Image (cartoon, rainbow, N blue to C red):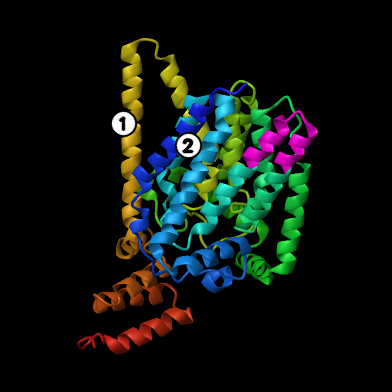
Amino acid sequence: MEHTGWAGRVRAPLALAALCLIVWGAVPGGTFQDDDLVGPLGLAGGWRIRPFLRLTFSAQEALHGHRADLLLAANLALLAITAIGVWALAVRRLGPAAAFLAGAAFLLQPAHAEAVAYVSGRSMGLMAALSVWAIWAHLKSVRADDARTRRGWASLSLLLLVLAVLSKEVALVLPLLAWVAARWDSPDRPSRIRPLVATAAGLGALLVLAFPRYRTLAGWSLAQHGPLPALLQHLSALPAQLSLWVRPSALSLVHAPGEGWVPPLLGAAVLAGVIAVAWLLRRRAPTFAFAVGWALLALVPTHTLLARADTVTDRSLHLAWVGPAIALGALLAGLVSRARNPRARALAGATLLAIAVLAAQAVRARVHVWSDPRALWTEAVTRAPGSARAWNNLGLVLLEQEPRAATAALRRAVALSPADPRLLSTLVLMESLCPTDGPCR
């Protein structure tokens, strides 16, 4: 039985859209970032993959040109669509109050800044929005009693899966997310994920064959670390990665390798313990088990056997936060419902409001940093002083207004990565314009 009527189904999405504008509304005021996109893909390589993502950028630029404000506004819209999708996933199982709080919890996560406030960062936001609604359509097909209705919802789910994968390849994990969502939402019905699995497998093979850049990426990854060393590295970094959800002061575009990491065996033990607890509580606390399963499965494509240029990143947590947000919504709604007298309810409401205000402040702080290239890269070199990329990009930001400070930053970048020809050529050019022992030209 549905827990909410037509009016509730309209009010909640509108309220979530309004909340998104309140806490993230400064995003379109941002600008393009000086980011050299160091890594195996790079910007040019990125445009040779992810065709649906490329299509969205091309369509926008054909309509209004290369405008940062409108590109960022599209990212903001995708965040609102994903949050409403979180509400839609939760409302039948948890009820309207918990579902709304789940959508709000998703919106109030400061770690989304890299996915939302970065002009070139649409792949994660677009993929997450399509994935959440693909799983919603899949759950509709699982619950449908009529075969024709079931096929219709299943077809929509498959279409959204295809678009999600063509936006960002990590969406190939979507069948696993659909399985854990179906076990939570409708445990008495078959999961019906075979078409999703078959489609994802076919898409994975097609991407490898049709886009050589993926083979380049895999070769680069294997050249950095073999599968086992990469897995051990990810196990070491996993606690630091997940802790970013509750440590907004640690969020950054660049994270120093090794900072907050644990020994691989300890990381594996923590991971195994969390999985074991979730499995044991799957019947008594199914929403908790769902949240753990979702979060860990969403990180499988980026945190298992393939080495990455950045092991710990904020953006990897975007889709993974859906499950914990739903569990957090259920927990908060439960706390409010257990407050039986008016004074207790007022206290619970005030507590929720205080949490929301603090979270909104953290979000706004992240948006401010991402809206100012100088603030972004100054923060990056503070959080990751050993990153050549961070120092190089800070130098590029300072180039026009503070050439001597820019030269110093570029020297630091070259000192950290002396074999990088791009860093060397930039420094040579800059030192010719602003020599150490003379005035800048």
The quadrant of the image that shows the C terminus is bottom left
324 magenta-colored: no
- Tell me the residue that label 1 is attached to: 354
User: Which quarter of the rendered picture does the N terminus lie within?
Assistant: top right
- The residue depicted at 33 percent of the width and 30 percent of the height is 353
Q: Which residues are magenta?
A: 135-154
What is the spatial separation of the Cα atoms under label 2 and label 1, in whole angstroms? 22 Å
Query: In which image quadrant can residue 204 be found?
Result: bottom right
- How far across and down, in percent of the image, does residue 190 sit? 76, 31
> In the image, 366: left or right of 239?
left
Q: Is residue 328 visible?
A: no
Q: Amino acid at mark 1?
A: Ala
Nearer the observer, 264 or 342: 342
- Residue picked out by circle 2: 13
Residue kind at label 2, given as amino acid type: Pro
Q: Residue at x 42, y 35 (%)?
A: 15
Question: In this view of the protein, which residue sits in the foreground, 304 or 67?
Answer: 67
Q: Position of residue 42 (x, y in %)?
A: 53, 70
Q: Residue at x 33, y 12 (%)?
A: 342
Mark sitting earlier along the chain (2/1): 2
